[in-house]
């Protein structure tokens, strides 16, 4: 990870850009970033100028123009490019979301018999999520993990959902019938 320090506003805008970028060639317009971070387009343009001077974004001029993150941006945010990975689907209130996939799942409080929480980092906007939404993520490519629960909070800066986990299953568990005594 890079030692470059970003302001919270710079990090928020850069995280949004990275989350909205589909591949190495796509560009994201400033207006779309502004909507995601709940700022006006002028503020986003100002942040992009400073991020461009740091070598974290490239500007693409023209009617189809916008911004795209550099490799250095992924390094500073300690993220992998999503095109190098298989997508992990996300459902909100039973509906699959297009353009949203899981980057990372971190479980916390797994030793607590009353409560298990997960921090789910997304690629795509967390803006549509609010506390109380029922979500399911997965299956993951390697283990077939599916995690379901209720959103406690959505962290726009980190593009993260804090979820109160209600159930976790893997493909192996789903394939094995449970006995009546379970």
Image (tube, helix red, strand yellow):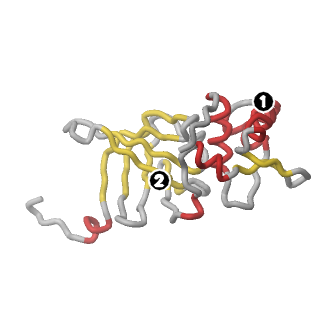
Q: Looking at this view, name the residue that lies furthest to the left.
A: 181
Q: Position of residue 50 (x, y in %)?
A: 76, 34
The total of numbered circles placed on residues is: 2
**Which residue is painted at 79% across and 47% down in the image?**
29
**For residue 28, which numbered disc appears in the image?**
none
Query: In the structure shown, which secondary structural element does the residue marked by tag 1 occupy?
Result: helix
Residue 170 position within the rendered picture, expressed as x and y whole percent measured from the top left:
31, 62
In the picture of the structure, the residue carrying the numbered disc 2 is 94
Quadrant into which the C terminus falls: bottom left
Q: Badge 2, how many Cα within 10 Å: few under 14, some, many 20+? A: few
Is the Cβ of the residue at disc 2 closer than 8 Å to that at disc 1?
A: no
CA gap, disc 2 to disc 1? Answer: 35 Å
Pick the front one: 148 or 28:
28
The structure residue drawn at horizontal position 48% and vertical position 60%, both measured from the top left corner, is 88
Question: Label 1 belongs to which residue?
Answer: 43
**On the picture, is 14 further left or further right than 117?**
right
Q: Residue at x 66, y 29 (%)?
A: 9
**Secondary structure at numbered mark 2:** loop
Q: Please tell me whether mark 2 or mark 1 is closer to you in this view.
A: 1
């Amino acid at each position: 990870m890079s030692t470059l320090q970003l302001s919270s506003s710079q990090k928020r805008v850069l995280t949004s850009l990275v989350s909205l970028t589909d591949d190495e060639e796509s560009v994201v317009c400033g207006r779309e970033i502004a909507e995601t971070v709940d700022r006006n387009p002028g503020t986003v343009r100002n942040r992009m100028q400073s991020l461009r001077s740091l070598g974290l974004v490239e500007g693409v001029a023209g009617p189809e123009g916008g911004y795209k993150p550099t490799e250095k941006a992924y390094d500073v945010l300690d993220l992998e490019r999503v095109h190098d990975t298989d997508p992990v689907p996300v459902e909100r209130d039973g509906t699959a979301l297009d353009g949203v996939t899981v980057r990372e799942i971190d479980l916390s409080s797994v030793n607590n018999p009353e409560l298990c929480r997960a921090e789910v980092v997304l690629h795509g906007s967390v803006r549509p999520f609010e506390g109380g939404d029922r979500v399911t993520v997965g299956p993951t490519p390697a283990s077939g993990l599916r995690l379901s629960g209720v959103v406690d909070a959505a962290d726009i800066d980190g593009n993260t959902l804090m979820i109160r986990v209600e159930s976790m299953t893997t493909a192996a568990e789903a394939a094995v019938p449970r006995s009546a005594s379970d």
